[in-house]
Amino acid sequence: MDEIVFVGLGLHDEMGISLRGLEEVKTADNVFIELYTSLLPNFSIERFEKISGKKLHVVSRRELEEENGEAILKAAETGKAVLLVPGDPLIATTHVALRIQAEKIGIKTRVVHGASILSAVIGLSGLHNYKFGKTVTIPLPSETPSETPYEVIAQNKRFGLHTLCLLDIKVDGNRYMKIREGLESLLKIEEKRRERIVTMDTLALGIARAGSSNPTVKAGFLKDLLTYDFGEPPHSIIFPGKLHFMEAEALIVLACAPENLRR
C-alpha cells in the first residue's frame, strides 16, 4: 500500500530506534532521513544502514520545507516510504505539514513514536511533568535578540510553573547553543528589562546529552551554572517554578542542587 511512515530515532545514536520502527525500515521501499531538526551526537548513517539493510537518503531542510517533501511524496506514490526523524517524529512542525499534505493527496500515513527530548529532559530533572508551562526555544545570538524566552519564563513563573528552554541549533553551520550562551542571552534581556525574572541568583537546571548513557544534570544558581562544564551538546535549560518538597529533594539528590532548597 502506498504510504509514508514517520519513524522516531530517539535521542542519541542508532540504537535509540524502537523494534517496531526498525521493522518499518526493513520493510520499506525507500528510506529517508533528516538530521537538521535536532542533534543525534553518536548517530552513524553507516552503522544504521548495516543494522537495517537499507540505503538512507538524506533530505535537507530545503527539500522538506521549500520543496514540501516532494521526493518523499513521489516515492510514496508507488510504495512504502519511511522518514526517519530525530526524537519523536511529529514534534517538529515541518513533519506535520508533510503528513497533512500526504493525506490530502490520498497517501496513507502512520507514525512510530520515539523518545522525545521533552519527556527525557523532564524525566531527568526529577520535576513533576504536569507542573510545566509553555516550552520555549532560546535562539542563537543575533543583532535583534528575541525577548520571547524571557517573557515565557516570566509568564510561567507567575503561575508557579516550570519552564523548559530548548537551545537553538544550526546543523548546517555546526552550531549548537550551549547552556552558558543561553543563560547569558537571558541575562542581557534582564539588564534591559530589570524585572528580576532571570538574575545571577535565579535557580536553574542544566541538562546535557539527554538520552545518552552519560547525561549531565546540574541544578544551581545562575552564578554557578555559568562556569559549570556541561560537556558536549545537545544542551537544555529548565527554570523551576514553585517546588513541591519532593521536587526540591529530587533536585538536591539527582542534580546536586544547593541543600538550602529543603527550606
Image (cartoon, rainbow, N blue to C red):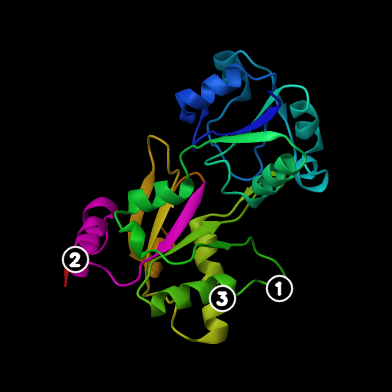
Return the residue found at the far bottom: 194
The residue wearing badge 2 is: 245
- Rounded to the nearest whole Å, what is the CA distance between mark 1 and mark 2? 40 Å
Of callouts 3 and 2, the N-terminal one: 3
- Mark toward the start of the polypeptide (1 vs 3): 1
At 60% from the left and 75% from the top, the residue drawn is 147
Residue under label 1, please give it: 144
Residue 228 within the magenta-colored segment of the rendering: no
Q: Which residue is mark 3?
A: 188
**Mark 2: which amino acid?**
Phe
Residue at the image point whose x is 61% and y is 17% from the top: 27
Q: Earlier in the sequence, mark 1 or mark 2?
A: 1
Residue 257 in magenta stretch: yes
Look at the picture and state if 193 lies above or below 70.
below
From the image, state whether disc 1 or disc 3 is nearer to you. 1
Q: Quadrant of residue 201?
A: bottom left
Q: Which portion, as a residue range, is magenta? A: 234-261
Assign a secondary structure to mark 2.
helix
> What's the distance in space between the residues labelled 3 and 2, CA to CA?
32 Å
Q: Is residue 66 left or right of residue 29?
A: right
